[in-house]
Image (cartoon, rainbow, N blue to C red):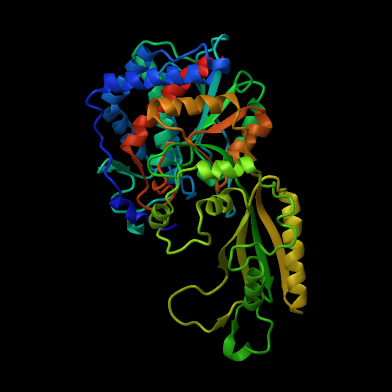
Amino acid sequence: MKSNLSILSFSVISKKPSPHPKVGRFTAASLLAVLLLLEGGMFSSHSLPPALLEKVFQYIDLHQDEFVQTLKEWVAIESDSVQPVPRFRQELFRMMTVAADTLQRLGAHVTSVDMGSQQLPDGQSLPIPPVILAELGNDPTKGTVCFYGHLDVQPADQGDGWLMDPYVLTEVDGKLYGRGATDNKGPVLAWINAVSAFRALEQDLPVNIKFIIEGMEEAGSVALEELVEKEKNRFFSGVDYIVISDNLWISQRKPAITYGTRGNSYFTVEVKCRDQDFHSGTFGGILHEPMADLVALLGSLVDSSGHILVPGIYDEVAPLTEEEINTYKAIHLDLEEYRNSSRVEKFLFDTKEEILMHLWRYPSLSIHGIEGAFDEPGAKTVIPGQVIGKFSIRLVPHMNVSVVEKQVTRHLEDVFSKRNSSNKMVVSMTLGLHPWIANINDTQYLAAKRAIRTVFGTEPDMIRDGSTIPITKMFQEIVHKSVVLIPLGAVDDGEHSQNEKINRWNYIEGTKLFAAFFLEMAQLH
């Protein structure tokens, strides 16, 4: 992925708490009480206890350096799940042990579920790190909120463009750089920190809390679906709501709530003449060359404006409503800032609404690479004997994975047949993940909005995510519970990229957000 070196030029974020936390936090809590009274309805007779909010927020401010130190210790564990080597698997097991110990010290009942082993294509077998199932409180008069997170990370090496050691959390101008800082160790710790604040102040938790924490999300959440299915009538039986914090805001300073993600259908198209490559001087001009066939196939998929050329691909896309258009208009997005932080000269679209719609509510097709082609420096006059093109389509409601597979296959077969090539072509869909969308009027979305008002003093952007978070759809379909995504990281955090970071401000205010969310959820029950 591209480097995020440009993030060093952004505005400084102070790591110091407000000089008058008591006044500021009391005002925020009192403001929320007024808002609740003004809104009426089921919340009109409730307000969050301002004295408790003040105590919790002060505690979080005063202990923020400890929270940063814990994040530093977690980032130092090289819990890379993508590279299938024993050393990283050992680190993953160590990471899960550290997390389990942390939860046990908070008084949680923790179960580390043995997930068996992973069989790799080369015949190697590696153990899968355990999944943590943890519970804090079982009061039947309280609601139960389950938090999902993951503690594995993408590969990182300082030689790949990092400005510092990726596994040494480094603070520069209020930005905490390190692999996993924002994806996903920081948000997981923010939730734990919020729990610890209530514990340290000897306050009852406002809700029962459960955790499901895994260590293989970046590698496809190996075996997790089977565990969720197995536990749906046990661990998940008493759960009322599920919270995930594994994505980013769409701006640098304005918080957001995410209510939808795109799905993903990943394809390969193989064109083969023979197993061996050819010499272009000996065979050039007398063959149907596999690379020429493949380039024609890939070129038939999408035009220069980003429009997908596969017939019927847009037929099932949900119709655009006036309410949805107004949602995009309400979102704060500085296009110039977004373009500069992305280091892109020009986008395909000129307006905020068009960009958001094509990121979130319309499908997109991306070509990722060609396997078997000569891609090294220098000049090699070779004709590849077989090549494999790789591309994916991001799906949106109400697109169906199996229908898309048939449409793509039929289209490529039609294009290939018109070339009258003697080569063989095989199309395969290697991954099919459905899109996810939630009802933003669900009670926990209302609670999250009000918690954001308390902490940040603003309405959140209601956003979707153009990427795919499979666990959201899995929880929705298997457990049948409401799922909400409450991101903590800023748009420039660089998840998966070099110089990944989370701002100290986001990390600490995010901890307060989760604490306020606990109290809001308690009001709903």
Q: Position of residue 142 (x, y in %)?
A: 54, 12
Q: Nearer the viewer, residue 503 or 231?
A: 503
- The N terminus is located in which quarter? bottom left
Residue located farthest toward the left when viewing the structure as drawn:
19
Residue pictured at 51% horizontal, 15% vertical: 522
Residue pictured at 31% horizontal, 36% vertical: 504
Residue located farthest toward the front when viewing the structure as drawn:
38
Image height of 480 relative to 262, above or below: above
Image height of 136 relative to 173, above or below: above
Q: How many marks?
A: 0
Q: Position of residue 519 (x, y in %)?
A: 46, 18
Q: Nearer the viewer, residue 139 or 515?
A: 515
Q: Position of residue 416 (x, y in %)?
A: 74, 73
Would residue 131 be visible to someone looking at this image?
no
Would residue 179 be visible to someone looking at this image?
yes
- The C terminus is located in which quarter? top right
The answer to which quarter of the image holds residue 73 is top left
The answer to which quarter of the image holds residue 428 is bottom right
Residue pictured at 62% horizontal, 35% vertical: 438
Asked whether, in this view, residue 448 is left or right of residue 508, the answer is: right
Image height of 341 relative to 469, above or below: below
Asked whether, in this view, residue 373 is left or right of residue 86, the answer is: right
Q: Position of residue 143 (x, y in %)?
A: 56, 16
Q: Nearer the viewer, residue 313 or 218?
A: 313
